[in-house]
Amino acid sequence: MAFFEVIHVANQQEAATIVQDKLEKDLKANTLNVLGLATGSTMIPIYKKLVESSLDFSEVTAFNLDEYIGLAPTNVNSYAYFMQEHLFAHKPFKETNIPNGKAHDLDAECARYENQLNDHPLDIQFLGVGENGHIAFNEPGTSFDSVTHVAQLTDSTLGVNSQYFDDEEEIPNTAFTMGIASIMNAKKIILLAFGEKKRPAIEALLGDTITEEWPITVLKNHPHVTVITDIK
């Protein structure tokens, strides 16, 4: 029987404590070897809590969901930079993996990353969700069968992401992203969603319909999902 749990929290700090407890349990049970990570403001309190904790990730391999195409790891708006700032520079991992935003051959980079994922099955994958229901950069309409690919970002996503870029800096409109099938291969998924802007996506997830127009709804087909949210 599938495991689908919704945990309501008062704030992101409470969510971070729950996440820490779940990771600690799996680390102690030696069932956490590969961890899928996400970026964005949702994850900042989570990573802060993990950095402050005594959890040891030195034997854990990490994979990130996505990366902007065209941004070097040293660019402050790249997800590689985000991960260094908020987690990797403070907590050592056995190995960390993020798509190469400066790769010249986009198809080859997608294939390389997907092959790495196949060689290192994800034990837990963290997810946020976009206002339009996207998971990673799998925008509405993305095939549920998709693997790591180049995503064209929607105007909705670009609008939300514009807050992180200086006015004069062009926001990348494409990104490498794990596909929906790549994400669904994880043994467990932990989805975090906070704020009223995420309500339509959470309501879609908790509704009766599974549709590619709301990518988040595919999680209803997964065998082990935990949703942590302040939306009631």
Image: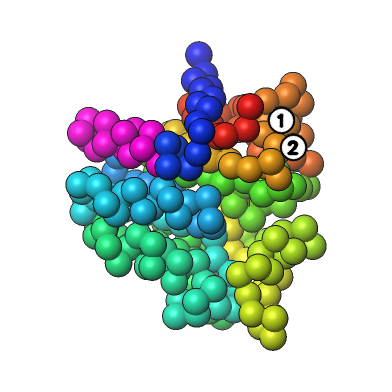
Residue 171 belongs to the span the image colors magenta: no
Query: Residue at the front extreme?
Result: 10
Q: Relative to the observer, which residue lies in front, 15 or 225?
A: 15
Q: Which mark is residue 203?
A: 1
Q: Is residue 179 left or right of residue 168?
A: left
Does residue 87 sit above or below 23 in this rendering? Answer: below
Amino acid residing under circle 2: Pro
Circle 2 packing at 10 Å, graded few (<14), some (14-19), many (20+), is some
Question: Does the magenta stretch mainly form a helix, a strand or a loop?
Answer: helix
Residue 25, image x and y in percent?
A: 27, 31
x 67%, y 25%: residue: 206
Q: Is residue 107 visible?
A: no
Q: Which mark is residue 139?
A: none
Mark 2, secondary structure of its residue: helix
- Magenta-drawn segment: 16-31
Q: Is residue 78 visible?
A: yes
Q: Is residue 27 left or right of residue 142?
A: left
Residue 20 belongs to the span the image colors magenta: yes
Amino acid residing under circle 1: Glu
Q: Which residue is mark 2?
A: 200
x 71%, y 30%: residue: 203
Q: Are marks 1 and 2 in contact (CB under 8 Å)?
A: yes
Mark 1, secondary structure of its residue: helix
Residue 214, image x and y in percent?
A: 74, 40
Q: Quadrant of residue 80?
A: bottom left
Residues at marks 1 and 2, CA–CA distance in whole angstroms: 5 Å
Residue 24, image x and y in percent?
A: 26, 36
Q: Relative to the observer, which residue lies in front, 68 or 23?
A: 23
x 66%, y 38%: residue: 216
